[in-house]
Amino acid sequence: MKDNISHSLFVPQQPDEVWEYLTRPDLMELWLMKNDFEPVVGRQFRFMTNPIPKFDFDGITYCTVLEVDPCKKLSYSWKSGPGDGLITVDSLVTWTLTPKDGGTELLLEHTGFKEARHFAIFSALDGGWFSNIKKIAQLLNDTPHGATNA
């Protein structure tokens, strides 16, 4: 079983504009889920959505910020399960932003799927991340330059 999700996309915006969509809770909610994220190493936060019982997912993803290199790299743990404190998925999400050709190469890597029981959630996340990274690109294209800077 493949144990690494990786998606890369070029966007014509600069890394600081892309960074906003990876680190501002209000903008993250537009393409991912409700959250209480802050880009501070050690910060524990959650992504919250509706439960999906067929994936043993209670709707809450528990995360801890592990690395913040502004406009370059962001990583956080990604833990979820069926509820009652049981964690069945313990993985890592890493975003890397690389200036390229007047824009940004955005790379998402989600690693740590080592068990066969993770196949269904792995497949769902793989497709979900692909869709979400495209949502980021669309949001960036739909937003006038500098409009995300509140």
Image (spheres, grey):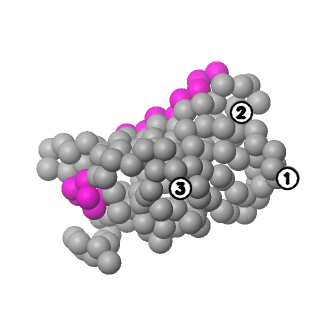
The tag on residue 43 is 3
Other residues around mark 1 within 10 Å, as few (<14) / some (14–19) / many (≥20): few
Displayed quadrant of residue 2? top right
Q: Which residue is mark 2?
A: 118
Q: Is residue 77 above or below residue 15?
A: above
Residue 60 visible? The answer is yes
Which three-letter amino acid code belongs to the residue tagged 1? Asp
Query: Which element type, helix, strand or loop, lies under badge 3?
Result: loop
- For residue 33, what is the image quadrant? bottom right
| Disc 3 residue crowd, few under 14, some 14–19, many 20+, Cα 10 Å | some
Report, in whole angstroms, how far the alpha carbon at label 2 lies from the one at label 3: 26 Å
Residue 48, percent from left and from top: 66, 62
Q: Quick one: 18 or 44, which is closer to the camera? A: 44
* Quarter placement of the C terminus: bottom left
| SS of the residue under disc 1 | loop
Q: Residue furthest right?
A: 84
Magenta stretch in the rendered image? 1-18
Q: Position of residue 10 (x, y in %)?
A: 28, 46
Q: Is residue 116 above or below residue 52?
A: above
- Residue 101 circle label: none
The residue carrying mark 1 is 84
